Image: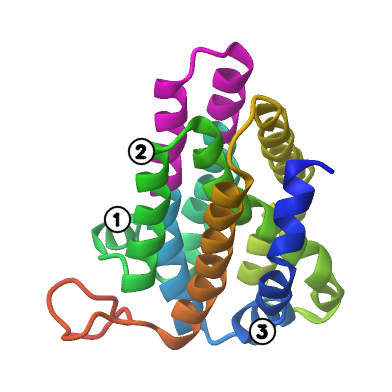
Amino acid sequence: MKLTETLRRSSAEIWKKIYDHPFVVELYRGDLPVQKFRYYIIQDYSFLIGITKAFSLVVAKSHDYNLLKTALELAYADATIEMDNYKRLIPMIGLKLEDVLASEPAPTNYAYINHILVTCSLGTPLECLVSILPCFWTYMEIAEVNKKYISNNRNEVYRKWIEAYLSKEYREATESLINIVDELWREGGSIARLNYIFKVSSRYEYMFWDMAYKLEKWKPESGNNFREIGET
């Protein structure tokens, strides 16, 4: 069995809960409150910057051409498919890019980014890519599982967000990440360690959606927390 198949099976129950999370379902149906989506966009943009940094750590640690090429391609896909899409959507929901860039990561977002960056800094390239894999892979599967709701979704912004994850380019990027993880596995590694890393990232994926749905804030509150545009 391929490593990715083993990892995927180990977190199947977590992933099922992700597909059914109310934020995800309401987003695909088009009835998610816009305040929650604004919050999510701000937090996810910050997270994607962290993912790009994680890919740079893979590149810095590797001398394998195929791994270098794939990591750079995935970083580019992250920037063009997701981040460029956000730049188009941000003005449509009443935000400015500078508002997004100036916002503080919420506790769950901060913890998830650091889980990945610590794994990439201290671990092997394979461990790093395994920590990133649930982010790419769950979004692809969420789109497939929940696309049944799209026909009734009348929210243009939500539909444009969804289209990015149903695109051929996103699927190819995700499959490229899955393939390179399986290729690296042939060189060995602790299955227990890799499974733990993958499961932690899968848990954080669920927690990220939950964070956005609940508009999570730091406690005690201070400084640059998310606030609705127009609030003082």
Q: State the SS at label 1.
A: helix
For the residue marked with disc 1, what is the amino acid? Leu
Q: CA distance from mark 3 to mark 1?
A: 26 Å
Image quarter of residue 90: bottom left
Q: Which residue is mark 1?
A: 101
What is the magenta range?
49-74
The residue depicted at 55 percent of the width and 42 percent of the height is 78
- Is the residue 202 above or below the residue 164 in the image? below
Label 3 Cα crowd, 10 Å radius (few <14 / some 14-19 / many 20+): some
Locate the N terminus by quadrant: top right
Image quarter of residue 119: top left
Which mark, by number, is residue 26?
A: 3
Left or right: 99 in relation to 92: left
The residue depicted at 52 percent of the width and 45 percent of the height is 84
For the residue marked with disc 2, what is the amino acid? Leu
Label 2 Cα crowd, 10 Å radius (few <14 / some 14-19 / many 20+): few
Percent from the top left, x then y, of residue 130? Answer: 58, 45
Percent from the top left, x then y, of residue 140? Answer: 73, 56
The residue depicted at 70 percent of the width and 67 percent of the height is 159
Residue 135 located within the stretch drawn in magenta:
no
Which mark, by number, is residue 82?
A: none
Left or right: 227 in relation to 77: left
